[in-house]
Image (spheres, rainbow, N blue to C red):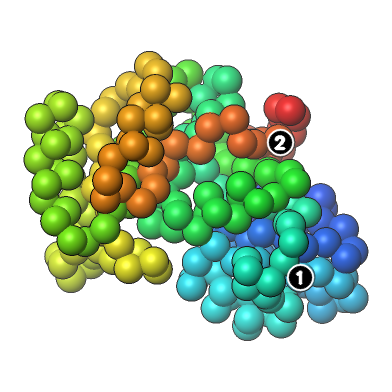
Amino acid sequence: MNVKQMVGEKAAEYVKDGMVVGLGTGSTAYYLVEALGKRVEKGLTITGVTTSTRTKEQAETLNIPLVDLNDVAKIDLTIDGSDEVSENYQGIKGGGGALLFEKLVANNSEKVIWIVDDSKMVKTLGTFPLPVEIVAFGYKQLFRLFESKNLHPELRLNESKKNYVTDGGHYIIDLHLESIENPHELATWLDGLTGVVEHGLFLDMVNTVIVGHENAVEVLDVR
């Protein structure tokens, strides 16, 4: 069993009968959804809210009942991966392009669990490029602004070398920052830019981080 599978299956243990569960996106969340599918097959009753088309398709093949975010009053628990987690438990997400839907689901959840391998645990955020989801109209204006601020922007492309398009129909600019000393300040600035739909700074959000090491799983209760 690989590390991602270990933490995915550990996180699935937090899901209880009757819960509305936010289902994350990415290579680690994949194993969570697989584990929940096995539990559903054995009689677990849950309702899933997915954060991407990929996760939706996977959950449907496992017969996990799904509803739209619009159709729930709240989500009991969301479990998702993270691209980086700092020593004070702030995160960067969006490497898989689902940051907008992931943040919408997380913000409407009673509790959030991140599942990661130990390579994602860092002292300071920023080595992983920060995704910024933007509207397609006039996107080069934002790109130029980021260039002028020395944020080292790079427009994300798909496998065909065309502009990557999110499930919400937007583009992503990845900012190669190396180190983010003041993530809250940066988040506030990005939030105020017209044309920015969302960014990958997930701040003051997670309750528990489940970290996979080579031979063990560590559970960190944050808040």
Instruction: Name the N-terminal-most of marks 1 and 2.
Output: 1
Q: Is residue 4 visible?
A: no
Question: In the rendered view of the protein, which quadrant contains the C terminus?
Answer: top right
Question: Which residue carries the number 2 mark?
Answer: 208
Few, some or many residues within 10 Å of mark 1 (<14, 14–19, 20+): many
Between the residue at mark 1 and the residue at mark 2, the CA separation in whole angstroms equals 21 Å
Badge 2 element: strand
User: What residue lies at 11% left-to-right and 51% top-to-bottom?
Assistant: 140
Q: Nearer the viewer, residue 31 or 168?
A: 168
Kind of residue sitting beneath label 2: Thr
User: What residue lies at 26% left-to-right and 58% top-to-bottom?
Assistant: 135
Is 4 positioned to the left or the right of 66 in the image? Answer: left
Is 121 positioned to the left or the right of 157 in the image? Answer: right
Question: Which residue carries the number 1 mark?
Answer: 47
Few, some or many residues within 10 Å of mark 2 (<14, 14–19, 20+): some
User: What residue lies at 61% left-to-right and 47% top-to-bottom?
Assistant: 107
Across and down, in percent, residue 65 comes to: 73, 78
Across and down, in percent, residue 154 comes to: 17, 45
Q: Is residue 18 visible?
A: yes
Query: Is 185 drawn above or below residue 145 in the view shown?
Result: above
Query: Number of labelled discs?
Result: 2
Across and down, in percent, residue 117 comes to: 56, 40
Kind of residue sitting beneath label 1: Thr
Badge 1 element: strand
Q: Nearer the viewer, residue 164 or 212?
A: 164
Across and down, in percent, residue 183 comes to: 42, 25
Question: In the rendered view of the protein, which quadrant contains the N terminus?
Answer: bottom right
Query: Is 43 drawn above or below residue 9 in the view shown?
Result: below
User: What residue lies at 38% left-to-right and 57% top-to-bottom?
Assistant: 97
Is 71 positioned to the left or the right of 177 in the image? Answer: right
Query: Is 144 drawn above or below residue 9 in the view shown?
Result: above
Q: Nearer the viewer, residue 45 or 101?
A: 101
